[in-house]
Image (cartoon, helix red, strand yellow):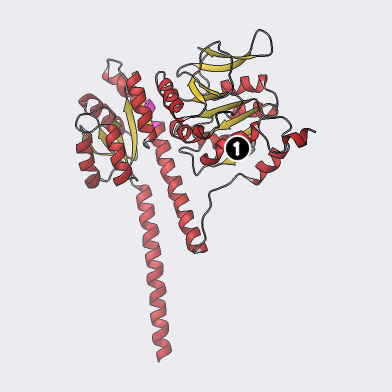
Amino acid sequence: MWMKSFWRKSRSIVFYGILRLFQRDRQKVIEQMRPLRVLVVDDTAVYRKIVSEVLGELPDVEVVGLAHNGRIAMSKIAALKPDLLTLDIEMPEMSGLEVLSRIKKEAPEVGAVMLSTLTRQGGELTMKALELGAFDFIPKPDEGNIDKNREVVTKAMVPILNAFVRRREIKAILNHKVEHSVCKQKNKTLKSPSVSKTAAVNRRRLRMKSEIIGIGVSTGGPGALALMLPRIPADLGVPILIIQHMPPVFTQSLAKSLNAKCSIKVREGMDGEPLQSNTALIAPGGKQMKVVAGADGLTRILRVTDDPPENSCRPSVDYLFRSIAHHYVGRATGVIMTGMGSDGTLGLKLMKRNGSIIIAQDEATSTVFGMPKEAIAAGVVDVVAPLENIADEICQTVRPKGAERMLA
């Protein structure tokens, strides 16, 4: 009799265990299927109207509320539970920067896309917002026509929202993997992803040290650069050229912000200047930037041009990387970091064919894994590394361990 009772209780335990797992997975599916909930925060009625109308016309997006300053926004976050804020930077009572600081502590799961004015001050505040964790930003249009402004916002907003949703999915997947691993391994310590085994093999083939570093980055770039570049030593010994997809004005603010954090010098590139060691030059927004040979055929100088966009980008990573491939055969390092799209892959193919070492940021630390993913899929990447290791990987190509022995 006790056996029958035991089996009945066992079946009940198993049944309710399966039911709980089903309910948990069902809840995850429901959360993934529900629309992206957005709270629109702006002190200007016109922009609240434009942004909310643009969002309201997008599938799988729900505008859950409006707020005309940061203080009201904070009071609504707890009640409305948005996934994302569209956030003006300059507002009365509580600025966008203050809101970012608060949600970082009180609601870290809530993302933010900034709406920024196209001014120097607006650019500097935008850099601070990105450093505080904003996902991306949209320059506020000022076309003088509300329909035209709405069109500009729509064009900028759609890819950013798609990237934000994809990033949330990736984070959920990675968090699930970590939870599963913790359960499986019990008390074992989880380690950060390291450089791939293939990378170690490829790096041993290096015969000459790199004499220039080219970096391509887009969405999530300012924050990634702010963490990576300060780890570059002041005596690196080579120039660094950076393409960050940004409009005019903002790249100057980015360079100023990074220069204050780094041991090397960081500034916007100027047309005709010679490349200098221990200096990072950022392509000016709205311009193309490339390397050309100097008049003596030995020195290398920078060209900043109005050449057409490539991959809908100006500045374009491909545009810069092609020039590095031509002028630094076998003596260059290409770095592709977080960003949407595939800009940089074609240039990296040429760099790789000409003997360059290629480093890509890994998925776990990328805000958007588009650009690194495309380069990895193309088979041109030697090293896949987390953000915190990229500076060290760069240094390894400039000062390869055992290089003297290999060259002997």
Q: What residue appears at the point 25 percent right and 43 percent down from the top-left corner?
A: 77
Callout count: 1
Q: Is residue 191 left or right of residue 348?
A: left
Q: Is residue 304 left or right of residue 25?
A: right
Whether 140 is drawn above or below 272: the answer is: below
Judge the density around disc 1: few (<14), some (14-19), many (≥20) Cα neighbours within 10 Å.
many
In the image, 137 versus 228, the foreground residue is: 228
> What is the magenta segment's predominant secondary structure?
helix
Q: Amino acid at mark 1?
A: Glu
Camera-side residue of 388 and 369: 388
Image quarter for residue 349? top right
| Residue 105 visible (yes or no) | yes
Q: Residue at x 39, y 19 (%)?
A: 249
Q: Which residues are magenta?
A: 154-158
Residue at image coords 41%, 84%: 6
Is 270 covered by the magenta stretch? Answer: no
From what the image shows, is residue 80 above or below residue 302? below
Whether residue 327 is situated above or below residue 216 in the rendered picture? above
Q: Residue 391, percent across and down?
A: 56, 35
Taking the view exactly as shown, the residue that stands out farthest to the top is 295
- Quadrant showing the N terminus: bottom left
Question: Is residue 155 within the magenta segment?
Answer: yes
Where is residue 23? Give x, y as percent. 36, 61
| Quarter assignment of residue 208 | top right
Question: Quick one: SS at disc 1?
Answer: helix
| Residue occupying the far right of the picture | 408
How far across and down, in percent of the image, does residue 8 sit?
39, 82
Outermost residue on the bottom side: it is: 1
Which residue is denoted by mark 1 in the rendering?
Answer: 393
- Compare residues 286 and 370 and report the one nearer the observer: 286
